[in-house]
Image: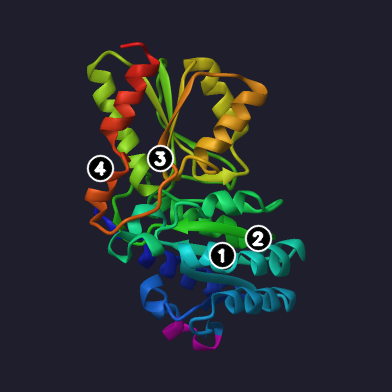
């Protein structure tokens, strides 16, 4: 199936949902072109608010809209959605038990030429500290559209990491999704690769094929929702395969690796390895170069899998 630009899918899904629900609005911080939401503004100009370069104010306005009964989807680059808005999002939206849907675009290395200042490797770690917050990262156009539907119907705050670029579909259009539930993309018996986001789910699938050539049967789980984590599925595969790898476009500290390690250490101690950024800042470069630079590759997953398997 053809690739689709994720930001276009984001906008199209919000337009469709807005046609069905008059309470859905968008709030942006001077980045509608970057977020891909200009068509939403054209369709619903009275429901598209641009606050300018004022991200904390964007969240405050979104909180006010939620108080008035609206369902605000607020979006900006992930570095700003996390670092700049954290206090307002924590207090005005989450502590107040409101219904603000915050989207951070260009997570991790997908920020590419915007460089280290705009490359959020820590956003998920910050957001995981907020009580009751739902944190999700769709991996393809289908999961994005379906999880947006779930997110709009769910009352409560959420943080979504949105890969903006074109991505090939992993799922069929009829696939069903639920917040807090992961998907097994490939079954296996020897090791489990839990992956998050468009970049790393793709790399995990490549790694599983390479491992198969070496006689290792690798399961691949598309995590989709980091909080709440799909506890039962991950624990069942820890029992089934006895080894777990996490793969994420984020710092391993505080992200998916941290979340899975916390779960396993409490409930099912399991040998594991973490693929992700290891206590470093971002850099400028192409996405392909950055993947190699930070070892966010199928080759690195294979290397860690072989080490866990003593091969």
SS at mark 4 in the image: helix
The answer to whether mark 2 and mark 1 are in CB contact below 8 A is yes
Cα separation between marks 3 and 1: 23 Å
Residue 292 vs 218, above or below: the answer is below
Image location of residue 170, percent across then percent down? 34, 44
Cα separation between marks 3 and 2: 26 Å
User: Residue 106's image quarter?
Assistant: bottom left
Mark 4 or mark 3: whose residue is earlier in sequence: 3
Image location of residue 169, percent across then percent down? 32, 49
* Relative side of 39 to 2, left or right: right
Q: Is residue 45 magenta?
A: yes
SS at mark 3 in the image: strand
In the image, the segment drawn in magenta is 41-46
Residue 250 vs 149, above or below: the answer is above
Q: Is residue 29 magenta?
A: no
Mark 3 or mark 1: whose residue is earlier in sequence: 1
Q: Give me the disc on residue 276.
A: 3
Q: Nearer the viewer, mark 3 or mark 2?
A: 3
Image location of residue 154, percent across then percent down? 65, 58
User: Residue 232's image quarter?
Assistant: top right
The residue indicated by pointer 1 is: 102
Residue 67 vs 166, above or below: the answer is below
Mark 2 or mark 1: whose residue is earlier in sequence: 1
Cα separation between marks 1 and 4: 30 Å
Mark 3 is surrounded, within 10 Å at the Cα level, by few (under 14), some (14 to 19) or many (20 or more) other residues, namely many
Residue plotted at (47% across, 40% down): 252
Foreground residue among 20 and 245? 245
The answer to whether mark 1 and mark 4 are in CB contact below 8 A is no
């Amino acid at each position: 199936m053809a690739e689709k630009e994720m930001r276009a899918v984001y906008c199209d899904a919000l337009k469709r949902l807005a046609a069905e629900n008059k309470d859905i609005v968008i709030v942006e911080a001077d980045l509608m072109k970057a977020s891909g939401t200009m068509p939403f503004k054209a369709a619903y100009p009275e429901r598209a608010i641009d606050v300018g370069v004022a991200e904390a104010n964007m969240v405050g306005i979104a909180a006010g809209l939620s108080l008035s009964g609206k369902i605000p989807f607020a979006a900006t680059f992930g570095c700003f959605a996390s670092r700049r808005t954290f206090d307002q999002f924590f207090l005005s939206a989450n502590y107040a038990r409101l219904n603000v849907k915050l989207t951070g675009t260009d997570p991790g290395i997908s920020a590419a030429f915007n460089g280290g200042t705009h490359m959020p490797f820590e956003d998920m770690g910050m957001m995981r500290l907020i009580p009751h917050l739902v944190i999700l990262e769709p991996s393809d156009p289908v999961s994005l559209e379906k999880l947006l539907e779930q997110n709009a119907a769910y009352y409560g705050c959420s943080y979504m990491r949105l890969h903006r670029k074109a991505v090939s579909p992993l799922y069929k259009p009829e696939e069903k999704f639920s917040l807090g539930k992961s998907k097994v993309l490939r079954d296996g018996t020897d090791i489990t690769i839990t992956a998050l986001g468009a970049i790393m789910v793709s790399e995990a699938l490549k790694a599983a094929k390479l491992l198969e050539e070496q006689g290792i049967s690798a399961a691949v789980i598309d995590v989709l929702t980091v909080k709440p984590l799909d506890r039962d599925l991950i624990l069942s595969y820890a029992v089934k395969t006895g080894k777990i790898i996490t793969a994420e476009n984020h710092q391993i500290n505080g992200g998916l690796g941290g979340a899975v390690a916390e779960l396993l250490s409490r409930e099912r101690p399991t040998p594991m390895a973490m693929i992700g950024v290891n206590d470093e800042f971002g850099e400028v470069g192409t996405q392909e170069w950055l993947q190699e630079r930070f070892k966010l590759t199928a080759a690195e997953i294979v290397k860690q899998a072989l080490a866990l398997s003593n091969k």
